Amino acid sequence: MPYLVGPPSHVNLRDTLKDALARYQDSLPVVEEHGKQADSSPEEPVQPSPAAPLPVQALPRPAVGEAGTISAETPQLTAAQRRQQVSRANRYARYQQILALARAGLSQRAIARQLHLSRGCVHRYVVAQSFPERALPGKRGSQLDPYLPYLRQRWEQGCHNGRLLAHEIEVQGFRGSASLVRQLIGGWRANLPAPEPGARGPKRRTAPPAPRRISARQASWWFVTPPEQLTDAQRMLLERVCQTNATLEELYQLGQQFALMVKQRRARRLDPWLRRVSQSASTDLQGFASGIKRDYAAVKMALSVPWSQGQVEGQITRLKLLKRQMYGRARFELLRSRVLRRA
């Protein structure tokens, strides 16, 4: 029976009030959105002081020079170029180490054994007049080379469509993919001058946000909460809700009376409250009162004695939790032990 205990009846009343308030959702007052404070200004980006050190990401990466030295002024490099610089620095350090061991009188075989290198690598470094640089890969020819003069001519004439240019050279015998043409003109397009900004039209105004009204759920909490526990802003909104409709004012009064009756356990006030509800215009609250009348004896007892069935309900919930945890995993003996020997 859901009306035996004070707190469950309190919650059921709030749900009933929420359903009743939902019927007057369009009549509830609009919540005023407060903007930013007037004295607050938008955050300005923090400008680093001249004496402040640059962040680590802004420092230029050092480059290894011809003799293995580090150059401070280096243009921005790509990741591949940085890997090449690190590889060259390692090879240069190995070259200096091999020369030092060779000047110390060690043989090429001993140097290779000590540094775990091949004899061919040691021999190449020892006999070299200077540090042997790696040969740069030669530039391979492209399928577009025979058509570059025609593509450049069409580009200067104003045709900047990669698909159209690829179709034109296909007629001339080009058998490559159109992506090669797009990649080529992509570099040309990057060198084009930036277009002049055109005149902008009037800025399109966005529709103002829809006004946000107090929700029925929020108002139902206020209807059963003591006024002294509400903030000043909540009390002002609650007054506006009650002033909207006479039925809402009646719902508030009945909700406060029932909450106070349950809290103070005033069983003698139950019958007058039920008679007043039967005369009210709220069908939702009348349905709530009908449920109380069906369990009248239990509700009357709950409002008269200090005991409740909270412990019983808690033990039932705990038993259901243990049963679901052990379902299909253990037998009744273990379930009985866990219930009786509460940890």
Image (cartoon, rainbow, N blue to C red):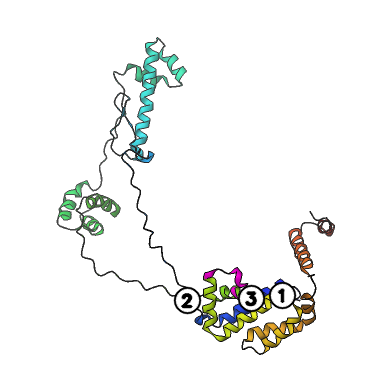
Whether tag 3 and tag 1 are in contact, CB under 8 A, the answer is: no
Name which of mark 2 and mark 3 comes first in the sequence. Answer: 3
Name which of mark 2 and mark 1 comes first in the sequence. Answer: 2
Measured from the top left, where is residue 117 in percent x and y? 43, 22
Task: Looking at the picture, tell me which residue is in the foreground, 314 or 140.
Answer: 314
Q: Is residue 338 left or right of residue 282?
A: right
Q: Secondary structure at mark 1?
A: helix
Identified at 64% across, 76% down, the residue is 14
Residue 296 in which image quadrant = bottom right
Q: Is residue 68 placed above or below 188 in the rendered structure?
A: above
Q: Secondary structure at mark 2?
A: loop
Which residue corresponds to mark 2? 30
Please give the label number shown on residue 9: none
Farthest bottom residue in view: 279
Name which of mark 3 and mark 1 comes first in the sequence. Answer: 3
The mark closer to the camera, 3 or 1, is: 1
Which residue corresponds to mark 3? 14
Identified at 80% across, 77% down, the residue is 301
Measured from the top left, where is residue 204 in percent x and y? 30, 71
Task: Indicate the quadrant containing the N terminus: top left, top right, bottom left or bottom right.
Answer: bottom right
Which residue corresponds to mark 1? 262
Q: For marks 3 and 1, give the CA distance.
A: 13 Å
Predominant secondary structure, magenta span: helix
Q: Secondary structure at mark 3?
A: helix
Measured from the top left, where is residue 180 in percent x and y? 28, 51
The amino acid type found where label 2 is placed reads Val
The mark closer to the camera, 2 or 1, is: 1
Residue range highlighted in magenta: 222-232
Whether tag 2 and tag 1 are in contact, CB under 8 A, the answer is: no
